[in-house]
Structure formats: structure tokens, C-alpha cells
Image (spheres, rainbow, N blue to C red):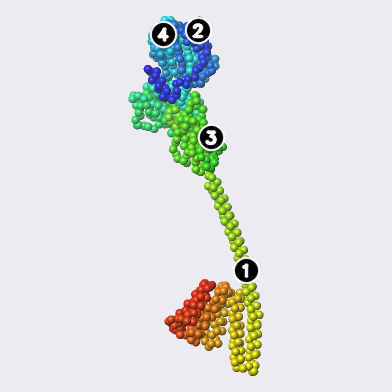
Amino acid sequence: MLFLRQLLAAVCGLGCSAFAATPVKLEAVAATTSEQSHFAEAVDGILSPANGWQVPRSTEHAGVFRCVPAMAAGRVRFIFSFHGAGKNSYFSEFSISTTSDPNPSLESRWVPLFLTGWDANQGWVGEARPNVRMLGDTSKSDLQLDGLISQEHITGVRIQSWVLPSARPGAAVLTELKMERMPMGTTNVALGCPVTASHALAPNQQPEFLTDGLVGSFAYPDGVRGPEFYFEVDLRHVREFDHITLRGRSEASAMNRFTNLRLDLYDEMPGENVPALWTWVEERAGEVQEPGEVKVVRGADGEGTFRGRWLRISKTVTISHTPQIAEVEVYESVVPQDLKVLADDLVLPQGDPVRVPPEVRRLGFSTVQPELPDGLVLERRWRLAGMGDKWLPAPNTGLIESFGLPAGEYLFEAQVRHSDREWNSASLRVPLTVLAPWWENPWARLAVALAAVGIVALLAWNFSRRRLARQLAEMERSQELSRERARIARDMHDVVGARLTQLTVMHELFARQESLTQTTRARLQELGATARDAVGALDEAVWAVNPRNDTLQNLADYLCHAASSYLRPLDIRLRQQVPVTWPEREVGAQKRHQFLLAFKEGLQNVVKHAGATTVTLILRFEDPVLVVCLDDNGCGLPKDTDGMEKDGLDNMGARLAAVGGVCIAKTLAEGGTRVEFRLPI
């Protein structure tokens, strides 16, 4: 049936359910029929043949009903029940009008209802728009009419019954009249809005076809019209828009009748001196346009501010019967609101950005949609910029859940989808800052680093203090040891040396006596020589012990003195190659003592085995090694060194090795022997 096709189109176009109607209570106000017509029985809720408003067919009549309470603009449904006792007791032709008069009456200003669909369970509707004609041979008929009300505040409904030349005799009985407000089920704010045209339209067309929600109805100008022709839609309020959808006529004859359009938005009634807030001009010259094309126009496509109350649709070219428009849909910008962020079920304080504690295991996002007509719920989607740009569908529960996020900056976005399946351009955007654990915070890391540096510095200071204390203690012990060594050296020199010297002098005095035998005198001379040797050994011990001699300079001087004192009495010539100055280096008593013993043994080897007449003493400092060479012009080293000579070389090497040095003996090319001592200082 035609009605079913129109109803299906309406449902598809509106995206709503037809089963969520809200009854509107009607009260009888006045009628042109007599009191006996039982006018009030038409809305008393009793459905029986003897109960209803009886309207004679021979004259025109009208009845007014009040809406309790008043109804806002939108979709409406009327159900007429004609259950009279006689056959064909229905209105042959009638119309429905509405008013916003505070006190509706027969004299009020009435606006015809714009019908969008109709159906009858018996008979059929021969014509509807503006009047409804019923045809058929039936005794009981229920007629359903759907329409759009463009007025903001509907207070009353008027039913007018007309006389047809072919009307059957008798009375029509309106047994019951019901009115229901149908849900809009769409975010299209242009649905049911008043539309005007600047010029006449083609036959049987109305401007309201552009906002009736039916893609099967369309309108276009009659004849050839240029850019001066326009449709104008009153959207009732100044609004902020998201997009405008235009639908062309879906017939092959409409080819290229939906191009070169121009859209203008106004916040005041358009006139000569009223500028448009926003303008869009289509640039599609020469392009082929398919029937039923849909144009989605957004604010960025035009110039100006995308808002207003009046939408004017015109064209930029002169082509006959254009533009052919089936539907104009206007969608306000709808953005989710009141975002609540939950961290492990704890609601976080709002902020810009919202600060999320560290190590949260589960995040939740709860948004509220703006209040929409009839409790309409729109599809939503969301995403977290910073974790990927992919949009994800939002669950119907309204709570969006996500796993915990790593520390960083994020942006939560949520969008809604309009009833025409277009996503709203604007979105709810809330920045998030997921805080890092304190040990990952840069300032915390800096503090830890500074603390670590402080601890290291404290440890270093403590270690340095302890080392300094040890060094001071070592210096004190060294000084104490030096003082003790100096005391020992002084005591050895002053006490033991003096006694030995006294013994030597007494021996010499005793040896001069003439009464001594030759044997006794010889023995006394031996004893004197032993005493003198003891004094020399004591001098060496005192030199080794005395801390004042712990320098490289003193060691070099003593080596030269010892060599000269040892070789001169033996008539062996001594040559010296010694630096004038020496660096300030300390040589410990142990090193000096061992080195001196090895050096003297080297002198003894020269005297005993070399048979040399000249000895050259070479001293030099190869930092950090003291090098001492004893060169002689003797017979050189034998090929097979053995006996006491070998023991002497081994003793010198052992003494030097004990203090980290070495002793090297070799035969010179020009003859003679070199004994080289190397002592690290």
C-alpha cells in the first residue's frame, strides 16, 4: 500500500521507532453542530456505535479540541474511528488544522496540518493534501494520519468536514478521535520546519516537502527561474551547526537538476540589507550529477560563521525546473559533555589537563550526551591520542574502559554520530597527564642524582678525611721514627763512638811504651786496627740511621766519600763523573744501608780480583732510577766465575734485589770490568 511505502521511507529517513508515541489528551471546546450531536463523546474514550460526534453530510461543520497540555512542534499522529451504526458513516472529505492561540476557538488562527502519511483499515484514502478524502463502501473504518506540526506551541486542533457533490446521505459519526505525539528520533532540526519559496512551484508541490522527512517527496520551481529563485527554511531558533545535508530527487528525469547550488545562513529575517553569516557556493560546472545524490556541507566548506536561523537555498545558473530537492536536513553540533575520569574506580578531579596518578591499572571515561528530543541516544566513538589515532566504538553502558597508560601526555576524544550516519565534526577533547612514578620523574631523578652525588661527596670527604688522618698519623709516626733514629744516631756517635775513640787513643799510648815486647807490640797494633775499623763501621751505621741523610744528594755524596776513603790508601786512582745537583728525592734508611753494603762489596771486588790501578765512579739519575757504575781497568771478568768472586756478585745482586734494585756485572770492550747498580727511588 502507498501508506506503508511512505511510512517505511519516513522511518528510514528519521531513524526512529514508531512505537514510542505519547498520547495527547484532547478536550472538546466547541463545534458548529447542534448540542444533540454529542460532540464531547468523540474524545471520551468510549468506542461504541451509539457514542460519538454526529456530523451531517449535507453541510460543512467544524469542531475544536484543546490539547492538554499544549504540545511542542514535531511529529503527530491522529487516529479517527468511524464506528457508526449505519454504513458509510465516515467523513467523505475533511481537514486537520492546529493553532497556538492560548484559548482555541472556531475564530482562532488555524494552520493546516502538513500530512506525511495515511492509512485506513477499510476503504482507502483517495487524496490527502490539503484535504483528506475517504473512499470505499464500509461500515467501520479506522483512519490513521501522520503529519508534521511546525508551530512551537500547539494548544488546539480543528476538524473540518466538507460536503462532496457525490456524498452519500446520512450523518458521519466520529466515534473516537485520538492524538499522539510521535518521537522525532533524529538530530535533524529542520524536520517539520516552515519552508517558503520565492516563486510558484510545480503543480501539486509544496515547500514543506523539503522538511517532511520523506525522501520520496520533492519540490522545484515552475518554469524557468534564475538565481532569483530560492527556498527559505525557518529553523525557529539561532543555532550552531555541524553540517547540512541536501538530498536530490531520486529519479532519472532529475539528472543534473541538483547542481550549482548556493546556501546562505542568516540570524535575522533575510532582506536587502541583511548580510549572510555564512555562504557556500557549489563549484561543479560541467559535472554529471546522479539522481538521488546527497550533498553534505560543513562549515569549513563555506565562508563565515556556521550558525543562524534562516537557511536560504538558491542556485547560481538559470536552468528550468531547478533545483529539484527532496529533503533539507540541518544538524546542530552535538558534543558529549561532563567527562568523568576514573582511575581504579576513583573519580579524579577535573582539570586541564586531568592528572592521572602513576601505576593506575584501569582507566574509565564516563561522558553524558547533551539532552536530545525524546531521549534520543546517539552512537558514540572515542580514542586516546598518544596511544594511537584509531577510533573505537563506545559501549552502550556509557562507561569507556581502558588499561592503565604509561607516563606521558594524552588527549581523550569522544564524538557522536548523527541520525544521518555522519560523525559530528567537533568532539569532546580532554587532555590527560599520566604521572610517572617518583623514581621516573625528572625532578625526582635529579634529586636522587644530587643526593647520590652528595652521598658520594660525603663518602669521598670521609674517606679523604680518614686518609688524611692516616697520612697525618703516618707523618707523625715517621717524624717520631726520624726523631728516634736521630736520637739513636746521636747516642751511637756520642757514646759508643767516643768510647771507641778513647780506646783507640789509649791503645796508641800504651803501644808507645818501650818495655813492650815485639810480639805484644804487634798484637797491640792489630787491636788498634780493629778499633779503627770498629769506629769506621760505627760511622757507617750512624750515617745509615740518621734521617738527615735520607736524600738522594746525601747518598751520592756518601758514595763518593766511601769510594775515595777506600781506594786512596791502596794507591788506586779514582775518577768521578757525578752531577753537581740532584733532585729532591727521599731515600729510606733501609735502601741506603743495603745499597751502601752492595757498593762497598763492589769496591772490595775491584781491589781483590781486578788488579786495577784506576777506578771510574759514574753516578746519574734516570728518573726514577739511580744508576751507579764502577768501571776499572783491571783484568775483567773471567769466563768461568766461581768461588768467592761469584759469591760476591751474588751478594751484591741479593742486596739490591731486597730493595727492588738490580746489579749487573760485565766486561768492557776496552778491557776492565763494569759493575752497574740500579736502584729505583
* Pointer 4 residue: 139
Residue at the spot of label 3: 340
Q: Quadrant of the C terminus?
A: bottom right
Where residue 38 is drawn, which disc sits there? 2
What residue sits 56% from the left and 37% below the top? 349
Q: Does dot 3 land on a helix, a strand or a loop?
A: strand
Three-letter amino acid code of the residue under disc 1: Arg
Q: Which residue in the protein does label 1 denote?
A: 477
Q: Earlier in the sequence, mark 4 or mark 1?
A: 4
Disc 2 crowd, CA 10 A, few/some/many (<14, 14-19, 20+): some
- Eyeballing the image, is 29 above or below 467? above
> Quarter of the image containing the N terminus?
top left
Structural distance between the alpha carbons of marks 2 and 4? 20 Å
C-alpha gap between disc 2 and disc 3: 59 Å
Q: Residues within 10 Å of mark 3 (few under 14, many from 20)?
A: some
Q: Residue at x 54, y 80 (%)?
A: 600
